[in-house]
Image: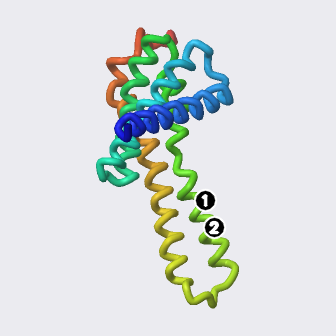
Amino acid sequence: MVFNMEWFVLLEKGIWFGVAAIGFSILFNVPPRTIVAILLLSAIGGLTRVFFIHWGVGVILASLAGSSLIGILSISAAHYRHAPPTIFSIPAVIPMVPGIFAYRMMLGFIKLAGDPSNPTYTAILSETVNNGIKTIFILMVLAVGVSIPMLVTRKTSVKNIRLIKRKN
């Protein structure tokens, strides 16, 4: 029963990753034919991140793994659905943005600004800096993880590139 419950929790997390991605894709006005692929990419990438965190990998490297998988799969989804890869990758990776770390960082700044004579000032400062660094690095690896697969495969994945030569 416990084993089945874990699978149910993972399925639920995947669904919520996908629902969040659908919300952002509708907000960005993507073509309707791409929404199901965006849902699947976000669920796969988000669950990859969850699995890596569960296996003891840090949240930064887990986010890199999830966003890299989204970047790789968005290339094939782009060919299958005839749309640019960024239409698939950007809404799919947005649910992995580290909102909780940024929120905790801002709360730390508010606490630090409120009372500098607080005896726990250095502990709050340390936690605030830690959350800020995590936020920055997670955002960087999300951008790198999505963009590197597209940059590496650009020559092979772009269809019919034609250079227009000007006549002088």
Q: Secondary structure at mark 2?
A: helix
Query: What residue appears at the point 64 percent right and 86 percent down from the top-left corner?
Result: 116
Q: How is the image coloured?
A: rainbow
Mark 2 in CB contact with mark 1 (< 8 angstroms): yes
- Please tell me which residue lies in front, 85 or 47: 47
**Does residue 67 appear to the left or right of 121 in the view shown?**
left
Q: Is residue 67 visible?
A: no
- Where does the image place residue 10, in percent across and percent down from the top left? 43, 36
Q: Secondary structure at mark 1?
A: helix
Distance in Å between CA atoms under marks 2 and 1: 6 Å
Query: What residue appears at the point 66 percent right and 26 percent down from the top-left corner?
Result: 26
Q: Quadrant of the N terminus?
A: top left
- Please tell me which residue lies in front, 40 or 76: 40
| Amino acid of disc 1 | Tyr
Q: In the rendered view, tell whether residue 35 sits above or below residue 14.
A: above
- Where does the image place residue 99, in percent across and percent down from the top left? 57, 51
- Circle 1: is it few (<14), some (14-19), or many (20+) Cα within 10 Å? some
Q: In the rendered view, tell whether residue 56 sits above or below residue 15.
A: below
| Amino acid of disc 2 | Leu
Q: Say which residue label 2 marks.
A: 107
Specify the label residue 103 is tagged with. 1
